[in-house]
Image (tube, rainbow, N blue to C red):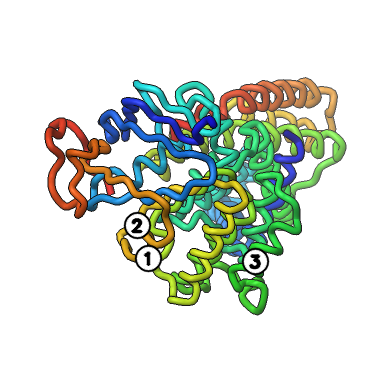
């Protein structure tokens, strides 16, 4: 299973490296979202600074939806979903591989967005360890749930619009937990943030287990 | 000797509709069988069913010793399907595609290289992104993927489509060599002269069924004797 996961993750990342969709389209979109928030919320009023953690994770979720759609769009083209079914790869391996590739892209986007909020919003943080753990746990959760809902939506004709409708409500615990943890890291009170990291880890683990078992039947139905 | 393909009254669904309406077919190991019939007769559906991609809902369906109704996944890893879609990633190079799918099938790395060479893709084309290939070159890459997986049952849907004469000869040679080495081949083709020369036996499918010897129309252009009205015509 892990061999298959490595194979699929390597393939997805290679496709992404060649097409540069994340670099040329998703990353600029993410930065644009941050700029639009800055226009909407006057930086001088203090609202922007206060809302930075939530805005950051909302931007991450928007980018995640795009990355997940892209991850399944490459399988929808030219019969590749049938090829995956015929490949002999373990469905759990395909799931973990696609999840890992999405997570890797999200980490890069989160770093870019982090630089964006530092430069555009003037955000400072004291709890780097908490922030890094929050990002890792939230990323795993987003990728785990996103991969599961991605394959669910992949077989539907209205997948582009349906995926956000299905996925974003499911990710609301991630948004809440990661925002609270980010706030704790920014405010220099990491003790308040760690329980939220625990919630994020439980979410990620739960969806990873569900995904590993549920991906195969969903791939068959899609 | 147990047949590689054994279908009795097999009914397969395409969506909610029966696309195969009770097919009987036996194919022995090492045999090359030509599947012929008019457009919409069910050739592609039959090949996809044999590959384990479409559900068999009634009748008996055994492929490579596995029951398609209960163990389709075990069948899939042992068959190679060359369909209308090329099943390639546009962004990856020809070599990347062949290597990825052959590794997925747990084939040896040397098999991927050999397949590239056999299909004439070992030169400049091996490092070209699939998106930049012509239709014929994509088809060759798709065939190379199938060859690299070393399947035991080859399911070929119009394998000569889009290929030049020389590559058609290469494909025919690959099929003959695969059969000689013990693989079994079911090929659907409208190029009857070439396919008939390749195959040891032909069967005709019309309206989702394979008529008996007395019912079969050699041209395959007439309607089945008593087609079920709900039988879907599939490309």
> Does residue B177 appear to the left or right of A108 in the view shown?
left
Q: Is residue B204 above or below residue B195?
A: above
Q: Residue at x 37, y 52 (%)?
A: B188
Labels 1 and 3 touching (C-beta < 8 A): no
Asked whether B49 or A205 is in front, the reply is B49
Q: How many marks?
A: 3
Q: Which residue is mark 2?
A: B189
Measure the alpha-carbon separation of dots 3 and 2: 24 Å
Among numbered discs 1 and 3, the one appearing first in the sequence: 3
Chain under label 2? B
Numbered label attached to residue B116: 3
- Looking at marks 3 and 2 on the same chain, the residue that comes earlier in the sequence is marked by 3
Give the structural element (helix, strand or loop) at label 3.
Answer: helix
Left or right: A78 as drawn, with respect to A198: left
Distance in Å between CA atoms under marks 2 and 1: 9 Å
- Spatial CA distance of label 1 from label 3 is 24 Å
Q: Nearest the camera: A138 or A45?
A: A138
Where, quadrant-wise, is the N terminus of chain B in this rendering? top right
| Residue identifier under label 1 | B194
């Amino acid at each position: 299973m892990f061999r298959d996961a490595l194979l699929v993750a390597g393939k997805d990342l290679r496709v992404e490296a060649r097409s540069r969709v994340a670099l040329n389209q998703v990353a600029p979109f993410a930065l644009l979202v941050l700029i639009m928030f800055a226009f909407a919320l006057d930086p001088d009023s203090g609202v922007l600074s206060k809302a930075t953690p939530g805005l950051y994770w909302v931007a991450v979720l928007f980018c995640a939806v795009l990355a997940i759609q892209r991850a399944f769009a490459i399988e929808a083209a030219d019969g590749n979903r049938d090829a995956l079914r015929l490949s002999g790869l373990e469905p759990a391996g395909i799931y973990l591989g696609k999840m890992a590739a999405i997570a890797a892209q999200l980490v890069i986007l989160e770093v870019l967005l982090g630089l964006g909020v530092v430069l555009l919003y003037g955000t400072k943080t004291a709890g780097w360890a908490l922030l890094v753990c929050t990002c890792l746990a939230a990323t795993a959760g987003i990728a785990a749930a996103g991969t599961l809902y991605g394959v669910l939506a992949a077989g539907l004709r209205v997948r582009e619009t349906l995926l956000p409708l299905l996925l974003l409500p499911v990710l609301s615990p991630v948004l809440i937990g990661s925002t609270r943890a980010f706030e704790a890291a920014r405010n220099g009170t990491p003790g308040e943030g760690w329980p939220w990291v625990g919630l994020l880890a439980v979410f990620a683990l739960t969806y990873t287990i569900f995904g590993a078992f549920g991906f195969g039947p969903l791939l068959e139905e899609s | 000797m147990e047949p590689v393909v054994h279908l009795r009254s097999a009914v397969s669904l395409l969506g909610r509709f029966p696309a195969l309406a009770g097919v009987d077919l036996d194919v022995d190991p090492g045999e090359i069988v030509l599947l012929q019939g008019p457009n919409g007769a069910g050739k592609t559906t039959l090949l996809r069913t044999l590959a384990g991609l479409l559900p068999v809902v009634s009748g008996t369906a055994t492929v490579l010793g596995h029951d398609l109704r209960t163990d389709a996944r075990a069948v899939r890893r042992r068959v190679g399907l060359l369909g209308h879609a090329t099943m390639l990633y546009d962004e990856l190079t020809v070599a990347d595609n062949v290597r990825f799918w052959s590794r997925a099938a747990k084939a040896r790395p040397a098999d991927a290289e050999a397949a590239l060479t056999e299909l004439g893709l070992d030169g400049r084309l091996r490092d070209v992104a699939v998106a930049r290939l012509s239709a014929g070159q994509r088809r060759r890459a798709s065939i190379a993927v199938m060859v690299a997986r070393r399947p035991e049952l080859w399911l070929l849907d119009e394998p000569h489509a889009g290929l030049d004469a020389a590559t058609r000869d290469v494909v025919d040679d690959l099929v003959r060599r695969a059969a000689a080495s013990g693989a079994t081949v079911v090929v659907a083709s409208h190029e009857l002269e070439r396919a008939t020369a390749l195959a040891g036996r032909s069967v005709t499918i019309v309206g989702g069924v394979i008529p008996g010897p007395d019912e079969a129309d050699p041209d395959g252009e007439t309607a089945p004797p008593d087609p079920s009205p709900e039988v879907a015509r599939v490309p």
